[in-house]
Image: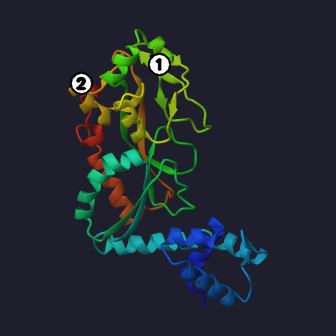
Amino acid sequence: MLDLNSLRIFEKVASLKSFTAAARALGLPKSNVSRAIARLEDDLGTRLFQRTTRDVVLTLTGQALLERSTGIIENLSEALAYVRGLAGQPRGLLKVSAGMGFGVNVLAEQLPEFLRLYPDIEIALDLESRSADLIAEAVDVAVRMGPLPDSGMVAVKLGEIRRYLCAAPAYLDRRGTPSSIDHIGGHDTIDMPGPDGRARPWTFSRGGETVRIETQPRLSVNEALTIHRLVSNGAGLGILSGYICTPQIMTGRLVHLFPDWSSPAVEVSLVFPSRRELSPVVRAFVDYMKEVSRPGILWMKDPLGG
């Protein structure tokens, strides 16, 4: 009889095309992964992978097995987790992916209470500036900011973050305060590059009027927390998340420029890969995040945003 755990490991190696990456994703020693594949090949009497110094490639037999086994392990794991959850408190490992800023400023504040409420849940929190591949990296749920691509994933909107154009007093003393919204382009700006690596235009609205300003950032950064620190330290103008910059605006450490103009808010969503019945662990996390994502709590606490 086939070992279902070996089959699960086989699917991970096949999807990542690497024994090392599969071991890392599964939290196993590489030697365990190699032994599981060898055991599966012995049981089937055939080779499943061609191994070279650089690549791991499925054989024709391996490809046939992958096509016929895809989803079997996922379905079985979800079913077992769900049934176990019915017998009591949710238990098991939850892998969560989020951006560095949200992880440091929000999840680090919210997760201790979640762990207290659910003592049998373990969390692997992966903080990256890039968006994780939920399927390939075995992520249970991800926190995503902004518009979501049409990826077939399930999304639950938690709320949205207001953003403000800010500068430090030291920068304005040195370079002067822009006299109108159209003069932003003549200043040092700090921004995150778009998905194509190019500078993104800044859009502001006031009443029924909208302006689109092309900027060429003097400093381009792929991480929002660093942008906030750079703006606070006087490096230039930047558009900052309200829940982070509002305390500094209210104490005068940052200046909110053109408060009658607004920058588009950023939606915050939870994304997960299955439309089937959520496991009790994922359901507990989703429900908890919905409960604590209410006006007046952490990132939803923004006096300037109303």
Q: In this view, does 238 lie above or below 180?
A: below
Q: Which of marks 2 and 1 is nearer the N terminus?
A: 1
> Residue 62's x, y, as percent?
72, 76
The quadrant of the picture occupied by the C terminus is top left
204 vs 251, left or right, is right
Q: Which mark is residue 16?
A: none
- Marks 2 and 1, how far apart at CA: 21 Å
- Residue 266: horizontal and vertical position, in percent? 42, 34
Quarter of the image for residue 263 reads: top left
Q: Mark 1 points at which residue?
A: 187
Left of 122 or right of it: where is 276?
right
Asked if residue 7 can be seen in this view, the reply is yes
**Is 108 left, or right, of 31 in this rendering?**
left
Label 1 SS: loop
Left of 41 or right of it: where is 140? Answer: left
Return the x and y of residue 86 as percentages of the image width and height: 33, 71
Question: Residue at (62%, 88%) from the top-left corner?
Answer: 39
Point out residue 16 in the picture as x, y percentages from the top left corner.
Answer: 62, 65
The numbered mark at residue 252 is 2
Q: Residue flagged by tag 1: what amino acid is it?
A: His
Query: Which residue is farthest front?
Result: 174
Which residue type carries mark 2? Answer: Gly
